Image (spheres, rainbow, N blue to C red):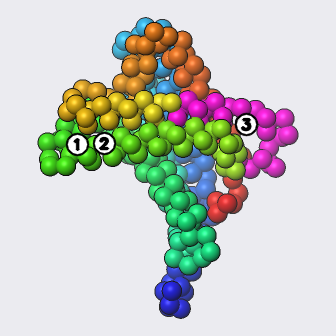
Amino acid sequence: MTGGLLARVHRAVTAAREVTDHPVLRALARVGLVAYGVVHLLIAWLTWRVSRGAEEADADQTGALHAVAGTPGGGVLLWAIGLGLLALALWQAGEVLLWWHGVLDGAHRLRAAVVCAKCLAKAAVYAVLGVTALLFAVGAEYEAGARLRELTGETLEVPGGAVAVGAAAVGIVALGLYSLWRGATGGFMKDVDLPAAPDRFEPVIEVIGRVGYAAKGVAFGVVGVLLFRAATTADVSTATGLDGAMTAIGRTGAGPALLAVVAAGFAAFGVYALARARYPDRDPSQ
């Protein structure tokens, strides 16, 4: 790497650190983490309702935002959720620049590239959910499952579309496996400032994190399998997103019991996200 390019990279990293460390952005990002936790708690509640036979409950992000919209002051809450999640996405995207110099120049380029990809994926998730919340706040209609089916159908109609949908399905399954791995290894503990939390909270955070990531891993895996089925059969009705995954689980022999377990897992993840908001990691470069 030339000296001029390296200097520009270092300037970008310094600017990114200044942005991500700005108290306003960090405060808004914590609001985003609270919103992320609340959304998962609502998904847990909706999944529990599905396990009890409530057919009108949409156990996904759209259903959770619908539930918020239906509460007194729901519009204000949706604005807070949307802006908080967008701030969280911006903060997460800033971490990419903090690691990008390691991709271009460093002894741990592979690790830096993996971290950058992970940060970009998280930023995308937060941004999409934030924009969806803002759409609800202004009264726009949006249904995640229907949009996924529409997008899948459009993709399958173009040459190579089935391959693209299949690749996306594999990616979602890989994301599920990553969530399971993260829960099993306890890697999520690095995202919490444990020294700032009371000692008695550490084992609680570890348990809810493990359970939460396991539930998300299972959910992502089912979503990916259903999407892969759509790619191989050209049946877009199987591309149904998280709500469809919960419905598929509910149709199995032990469906209600499995859904109750998944609901508990989503609730655990929601509480873990709230713990992250209360005790956020002080060094995003770790």
Earlier sequence position, callout 1 versus callout 3: 1
Measured as percent of width and height from the top left, residue 81 is found at: 48, 41
In this figure, which residue is indicated by the disc labeled 3?
Answer: 206
* Tag in front: 1 or 3: 1
Q: Nearer the viewer, residue 114 or 63?
A: 114
Would you place residue 213 above or below residue 284 in this image? above
Residue 236 appears left or right of 250: left
State yes or no: residue 47 in magenta: no
Residue 105 appears left or right of 70: right
Looking at this view, name the residue that lies furthest to the bottom.
Answer: 3
Amino acid type of the residue tagged 3 in the rendering: Glu
Amino acid type of the residue tagged 2 in the rendering: Gly
Question: Dot 1, crowdedness within 10 Å: few (<14), some or many (≥20)?
Answer: many
Q: Residue at x 55, y 59 (%)?
A: 115
In the rendered image, which quarter contains the C terminus?
bottom right
Would you place residue 260 above or below residue 90 in this image? above
Measured as percent of width and height from the top left, residue 179 is found at: 55, 40
Residue 53 appears left or right of 261: left
> Magenta residues, as a range?
192-217
Q: Residue at x 84, y 35 (%)?
A: 200
Amino acid type of the residue tagged 1 in the rendering: Ala
Q: Secondary structure at mark 3?
A: helix
Q: Secondary structure at mark 2?
A: helix
